[in-house]
Image (cartoon, rainbow, N blue to C red):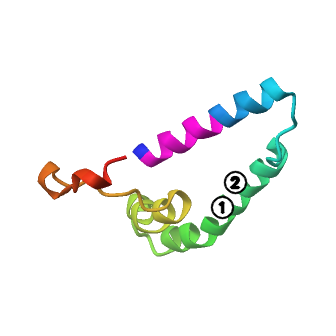
Amino acid sequence: MKIYLLSLGAGLLVGVVYSLLNVRSPAPPVVALVGLLGILVGEQVIPFAKTLINKDSAAVSWLHQVKPHMFGHLPKGGAPSDVNPSEKV
């Protein structure tokens, strides 16, 4: 989760710098991002429908098919003794 927050913070910082320099962002417009979200959700319609047809639990489908694909695998945190001090971000 920390990597996502760092990424969001970096994006906000770059956005502020772009605004101060009065430069347009090269990021795609919101409509394109909504389209990408539609693609991700659309990819999951068939596996989810198969789950419903097979009368499997929708929660199982969500945890094993949809969630890992749409959100990626979040990094696992280790115990403090497992973390190398030189690798801390």
Question: Residue 37's mark?
Answer: 2
Looking at this view, name the residue that lies furthest to the front. Answer: 86
One can see residue 1 in this view: no
Residue 70: where, in percent of width, then height?
55, 60
> Position of 82 compared to 29: left or right?
left
Residue 84: where, in percent of width, then height?
22, 56
Q: Residues within 10 Å of mark 1 (few under 14, many from 20)?
A: some
Tell me the distance, in whole angstroms, between the alpha carbons under discs 2 and 1: 5 Å
The disc labelled 1 sits on which kind of residue?
Leu
**CB of mark 2 within 8 Å of CB of mark 1?**
yes
* Residue 43 occupies quadrant: bottom right
Instruction: Indicate whether residue 54 is drawn in magenta.
Output: no
Find numbered disc 2 in the image and state the secondary structure of the residue it sits on.
helix
In the image, residue 78 sits, relative to residue 31, either above or below, namely below
- Image: magenta residue range: 3-12
Find numbered disc 1 in the image and state the secondary structure of the residue it sits on.
helix
Which residue is painted at 16% across and 52% down in the image? 79
Residue 21: where, in percent of width, then height?
83, 28
Type of secondary structure dominating the magenta stretch: helix
One can see residue 86 in this view: yes
Looking at this view, name the residue that lies furthest to the left. Answer: 81
Question: Residue 62's mark?
Answer: none
Instruction: In this rendered view, identify the residue nearer to me: 37 or 14.
Output: 14
> Position of 39 compared to 12: left or right?
right
Which residue is painted at 40% across and 69% down in the image? 56
Residue 51: where, in percent of width, then height?
49, 71
The disc labelled 2 sits on which kind of residue?
Leu
Question: Residue 40's mark?
Answer: 1
